[in-house]
Image: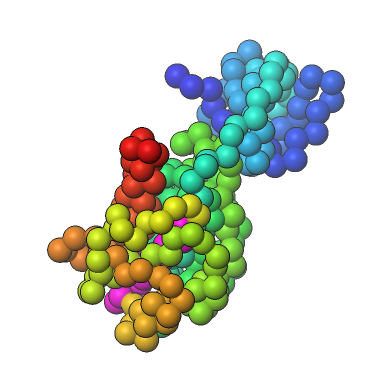
Amino acid sequence: MPPRSVFVPTPSFENDTLRITGDEHRHLQVARVAVHESIEIFDGKGGIWTASVAGADRRQTIARISGHRQAVRDRHELILGLALIRMASFELALEKAVEIGIARIIPVAAERSNVTAEKRHDRWMRIIVEAAKQSKRYWLPALDEPGAFSSVLSVQAETKIVFAERGGGALAPAVRGSPVVYLVGPEGGWTDSELEAARKHGFALVGLGAGILKSETAAIVGGALIRYELERRERVE
C-alpha cells in the first residue's frame, strides 16, 4: 500500500522534522495514522519528502524526514476551459481533471451557464488537493477565477479545441502539439455565437461521437483522449 500523502504548501523544517497542523493534521488523526507509520509530504510544486510519524497530540503531528525527491512536471500541458454547470457536476469534473493530469483549469461563464461560482475558490482548491493526494499528482493544477467566455479564447496554446455536439470533426487532426487548451460547454451546449467566436480565435471544433455527453463526462473523456493522442504520436515518432 502506498504511503498516505500529506499536502504542506510551504513546509518549514526543523532539522529533520516537520510539524503538520490544521486540516492535514486532522486528516491524519481521523485516519488513525500510527507512530512510525510511513507518510509522504508534498508541496504541490513537485517537492516530495518521505517521512514517518514520530508523534502527535491534539494540535499537531510530528513527522521525521528521511528523504526528498523532485517530481518531473508533465511534459504535456493540458488546459481545461470548463463552462460553469451544476456545482456537483462541476466539482466531479474538477476532481477527475486532476486525476488525468490537467495543468490548468479555467471556469468559464458561458451564455447558457445557469449557475454562479461566488466564493467557491477555496472549496475547489480543497477538492483539487484531495484529488492530487489520491492520484499521486505532485504538481497541483493552476485554478483560475471564473471568467467570461471571451477571456478563455485568448489563452495561448499550440492546440486549441472546442468540443461541440454539432459540427465537430475528428480529434487527431486537431491536435498539433502541446500546450493544449480545450473547451467544454454547459448542459445546453455552446451557442452559435460562441462557436463562431472560437473559430475566429483558431479553435478547431471537435466531436466526441454520436451521443451527447454530459459536460463533466466530456471534460474527462476529452482530456484523456487528447493525452492519449499526444503520447501516441511520441511513440510513433
* Residue 224: x %, y % from top left: 35, 48
Residue toward you, 184 or 53? 184
- Stretch of the chain drawn in magenta: 180-189
Q: Position of residue 227 (x, y in %)?
A: 38, 46
**Residue at the farthest front position:** 237
Residue that appears at 48% across and 52% down: 178
Query: Residue 182's spot in the image, x, y percent?
Result: 42, 62
**Residue 185 on the magenta span:** yes
| Whether residue 87 can be seen here | no
115 above or below 135? below
Q: Classify residue 146 as left or right of residue 57.
A: left
| Quadrant hosting residue 199 | bottom left
- At horizontal 55% and vertical 65% (from top left) the residue drawn is 156
> Which image quarter: residue 155?
bottom right
Side of 187 where 151 appears, left or right: right
Residue lying farthest to the bottom in this orientation? 193
On the image, the x and y values in percent for residue 188 come to 29, 76
Quadrant of the image occupied by residue 82? bottom left
State whether residue 167 appears in this view.
Answer: yes
